[in-house]
Amino acid sequence: MRATRPRSFGLRAQILIGLALVTLVAVGSTGYLGLWVGGAALSDQRATMAVVLATAAAASASAVVEPQQPISNATSRTRLVAVARDLTEHTEARQVTFFQLDRTVVLAQPSRHPDDRDPPLLGAVLSGAPPVYQYRPRLDDGETEIIAYAPISLQSRVLGAVRVSLSVQAPPTMVLRRSGWLLVSLALADALLVLGLGYLVLTQVVVQPLQAVERATARVTAGDWDHAVKPSGPREVAALADSFNTMMTSLASQREQLIRSEKLASVGHLAAGIAHEIGNPLAAILGFVDILRADAAGGAPAMAPSERRDLLDRVKAETQRIHRTISDLLEYSRPSREEAQAIDPMKILKASQGLLEPQKRFRSVRVVYDEQPDQAPQVLVSPGRLQQVFVNLLLNAADAMDGQGTVTVSCVRADRLVRVTFTDSGPGVGTDMRRRIFDPFFTTKPPGQGTGLGLAISRSIVESYGGTLDIEAGGGSGATFVVTLPVAVG
């Protein structure tokens, strides 16, 4: 049996899947990069805002504290509370904290977390460094925040520092969280748009012309060798259709030539065997004619009328025997132009056996039928072509058995198919040879005794009518060839 190749996705599906994946990757990567750049810009914006608020808080503190007094005195503290409250209520500042020079917290609005610790940046600002900022996780919920420090200066003297906290997620993550679903939706929408347009274009431009070629191939497989494909679609696909039509025209011509060549080769083998069979009747006829001529000349005792009739009957019988043999040979060798018709395969098999029986190499071959010929279902095939297949199979069996053995033939119906099996009692066919036995020009016979086309053309003939020809067994126990043909629909 032939191995079946696992079916994969079609050309259209593969191209559309590729387009969808490319679209998703392109849109997703471009959108992700854009969002990441937007997040970086937002990060810079938030950091700038934190520094501006810290600077503004430091300037407001410098304006309200008591000169020459620590910022922790009661008057300054009261005023700083107002500054902190104003910042937290009217800006995005989450918390405002004021420090003395010794890093002591003067006040925090709202109050600080007990585990809140300031980084070394605070010491740098208290030493007169310009405003700075830093990202860090919040202690209460783990979210990211920005803390900005700015020095509180009065007349070039640093009195303390202020810290402003802004709530913010990690900028790229925040932007991605906000816009991720939008990005995914846009990517999917673009992919669906590409799929829709790609489906329409591929169907019209590529798939339909290729399907026309596929349908034409199926029709050729079914035996319609005259079917042609109408060129359509892009230039490359139309060129493929033209090449297909040219190929099929050439193959149809070569196929007919091969079939005729093999049939003529088979006729040559048959004629060689039949010539001997014709020679014997001719010799007998010549002998009978000589006896009748001698009787007519009167050179011997006259024959009785019954003896003359007997000799003439024998001449007629031998002549009819020669005529029947030659008629069968001509019927087989004549190129068949008949259409497929519903026929009984066993009837064709019997005719093929009768054609071969006169041959010397087939005299010791016995054909045994497992099924009654009257019970065989009809098949739709050309009688001449089917006879060529059966003759080839019987001749191959006779050659495999060296002209002596038994060929067992059975004909059974399996669903919508008819199976005709030929099992010989020869040595069988090895596994390696079985893989090549249907190859054209492959033969195990000596040079000049076989063309190697018989089985190849027989398979081609059977397949042209929707059937199969395979070998099922071999290797020491004979070979079994199976012909399957569709049942004729009555």
Image: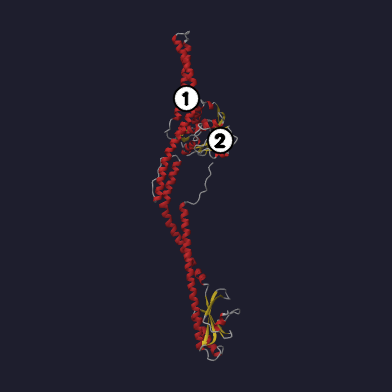
> In screen coordinates, is 216 left or right of 159?
left
> In screen coordinates, is 68 left or right of 201?
right
Q: Residue 452: where, in percent of width, then height?
A: 50, 35
Q: Is residue 383 visible?
A: no
> Which three-letter amino acid code belongs to the residue tagged 1?
Thr
Q: Nearer the viewer, residue 192 or 285?
A: 285
Residue lying furthest bottom in this view? 68
Mark 1 falls on what kind of element? helix
Q: Residue 40: where, in percent of width, then height?
A: 49, 72
Colour pattern of the rendering:
secondary structure
> Which quarter of the figure has residue 220?
top left
Q: Nearer the viewer, residue 181 or 384?
A: 384
> Which quarter of the figure has residue 228?
top left
N-terminal label among 2 and 1: 1
Q: Residue 169: where, in percent of width, then height?
A: 53, 73
- Position of the N terminus by quadrant: top right
> Badge 2: how crowded within 10 Å, few (<14), some, or many (20+)?
many
> Which three-letter amino acid code belongs to the residue tagged 2?
Thr
Residue lying furthest front in this view? 447
The residue carrying mark 1 is 325
Where 278 falls versus 481 (above or below)? above
> Which quarter of the figure has residue 406?
top right
Q: Nearer the viewer, residue 87 or 225?
A: 225
Q: Residue 477: where, in percent of width, then height?
A: 60, 34
Q: Which mark is residue 453?
A: none
Where 435 falls versus 198 (above or below)? above
> In screen coordinates, is 194 left or right of 404?
left
Q: Nearer the viewer, residue 169 or 285?
A: 285
The residue carrying mark 2 is 480
